[in-house]
Amino acid sequence: MLQLRNKKTIKNNELAFSSRLICQFIGGRHTSQYTSICQKICSSRVFVTVHDLFGSLHGDRDWTLFSRVGISHLLAISGLHITMLAALAGWVAAQGWRRLAPRLPRLAENLGRRGFAAWVGLAVAAGYVLIAGFAVPAQRTLWMLATIAVGLSCGLRPDPWKVLAAALVAVLAWDPWAVRAAGFWLSFVAVGVLMFAGMAEAAGGQGGAVPAAGDVADDAHGKRAGGLAALAVRAWPVLRGATRAQLAVTVALTPLTLYFFQAAPVVGPVANAIAIPVVSYAVAPLALLGGLTGLAAPLHLAHALFAWLAGLLALLAAPGWASAELPAPAAWAAALATLGLGWCALPRGLPARAAGLLLCAPLLLTARAAPAPGGLRLTAIDIGQGTAVLVETAQHRLLYDTGPRFTADSDAGGRVIAPFLRAAGVDRLDGLVVSHRDEDHAGGAASVLARLRADWLLSSLRPEDPLLRELGAAIAPRRCEAGQHWRWDGVDFSVLHPDAADYALDRSSNAMSCVLRIDSAGGSALLTGDIDAASERALLARGAPLAAGLLWVPHHGSRTSSSPEFLAAVDARLAVVQAGWLNRFGHPRAEVLARLAAGGARVLRTDESGAITLETGADGWQARTEAEARRRYWAGR
């Protein structure tokens, strides 16, 4: 499944992209000199091998696996990796202190061996954090190491809680908006829980049921058995403490992971017990050794170890219960549940500790309300340049188009649509419509169907289309033809285009877009895909029922669509444009927007407003945009 590639197989655009990133990191100076240096770095054997080792593991499917078993933190630049590197650098500095101290007497007098080792470790950690991108978890680790280094230099032994508090202040002073990042909450809460668990373990002492070494040393196996028993006795508290700490972190972070990711890995403790030693003490050091020395053997060994680990994790992730997936809870519910779990973790003897579990109840009861019978809700998912619309009735869910494919192993289906559906509480689709073959409409179909079951697929794709071959027997496809009709919960769905005869003609993919009309008691909507002006004229010639209060503007507002005659026939009061911000096509075109405005339509654009939710009500269509619902204080300034 995972294979290292020869450096010649890395595409030029990958190297160009990597070189641009390095140039931006150096200081944003895109001179020919900097670009040349960066390209040399990115085309080196070491960089290519590291790129293959970790880049090949970071596709959507791999990240889904890592998230499902709860080890995504190990594939990031985690605090554990930074601390490990700092400890290694500090150990090397401490070993060389005896030779260095006589040559630098003033430094030896002021710092001492421990202080010197701490500052060397901090310097190495700082360089690593800067290269890694200075993310919040990395910042937290760096500031904690800095606090420890200052304390050791002053002859103090800093209190762990004060060290964590100092790191919290430093992170917020550097970037007050860090509180909006999931990594901020997960990182600080996880470290706090580990420290609390460590204090509880220390307070508990050796009270666990540990076999005495002498009880086994007299066994017939003699000294060898006694030695093994003594080793087991020494290892038992460590294993017990690590197990309790891992369970504590998993349970404590459950409200936050449900809030941020709508999933909590049930097998997380087991997966982390296996993955943390392998990644932290084998894969990461081998990768670092290979990167520093240029030797390929450590990198190949690291790759082999991780491939073995990935196979084992796939077995853990296979059961349906491996990860608990729930709709996104409200922020107050997640905070309340976190407080409840904290109450449960208080020392034994305090009354009503179990009552903390009651505070977790709202976490499981929050759910997105469905439309009323006869009602209709459409959500334009913010997937950039492309189309993806969730259509909801009282008891049914349909997805119209699946957004763009970003790279060979990344698309809107896995990165945006599936997480959005999970957050909305949608665990299956009653139907999936892929309007036509273009990558910005069909690019995420395979990823969506890999994560959610759909009862049927309706599309204009030809039988030999690669997408249908990729889906295989996962779903039975049906051809989209004018005249098809179905009714869900008092809402009527009608296919207006393409006509059955169009499949015999040599027509473009855009011209074959499935046009879907939806009629409810509160209003009508017309989803048009990427039809062009010729298809619009064909609809007019056939006398198709086009009048609708809500129009999905054809082809993202391209100049080749939205003819005046078509817009006049639809006569929409609301028009939605799904387009990417500053997209290279210039969608929507100014002339199209002018025609819509002249016809009295209010235009909503995902490139300006983010996701758009439209729902029928007593007064027709009601619109809500993410930009309005989550308005920032700087908006409009």
Image (cartoon, rainbow, N blue to C red):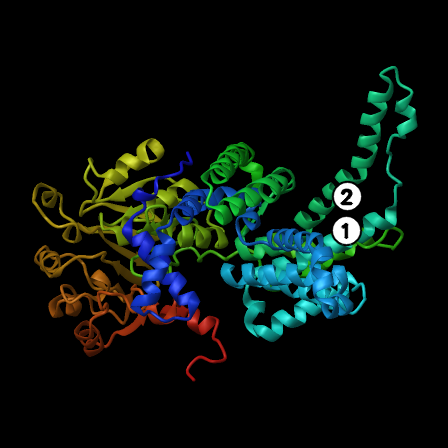
Q: Position of residue 255 (x, y in %)?
A: 63, 54
Q: Is residue 16 visible?
A: yes
Q: Nearer the viewer, residue 72 or 526?
A: 72
Q: Earlier in the sequence, mark 1 or mark 2?
A: 1
Q: Position of residue 454 (x, y in %)?
A: 38, 41
Residue type (three-letter) at the residue carrying disc 2: Gly
Q: Determine the secondary structure under disc 1.
A: helix
Which quarter of the figure is the C terminus placed in?
bottom left
Q: Position of residue 214 (x, y in %)?
A: 92, 27
Q: Is residue 284 left or right of residue 337?
A: left
- Tag 1 and tag 2, C-beta contact below 8 Å: yes
Q: Determine the secondary structure under disc 2.
A: helix
- Relative to 395, is 114 above or below? below
Q: Is residue 330 visible?
A: no
Write down the residue under mark 1.
197
Residue type (three-letter) at the residue carrying disc 1: Ala
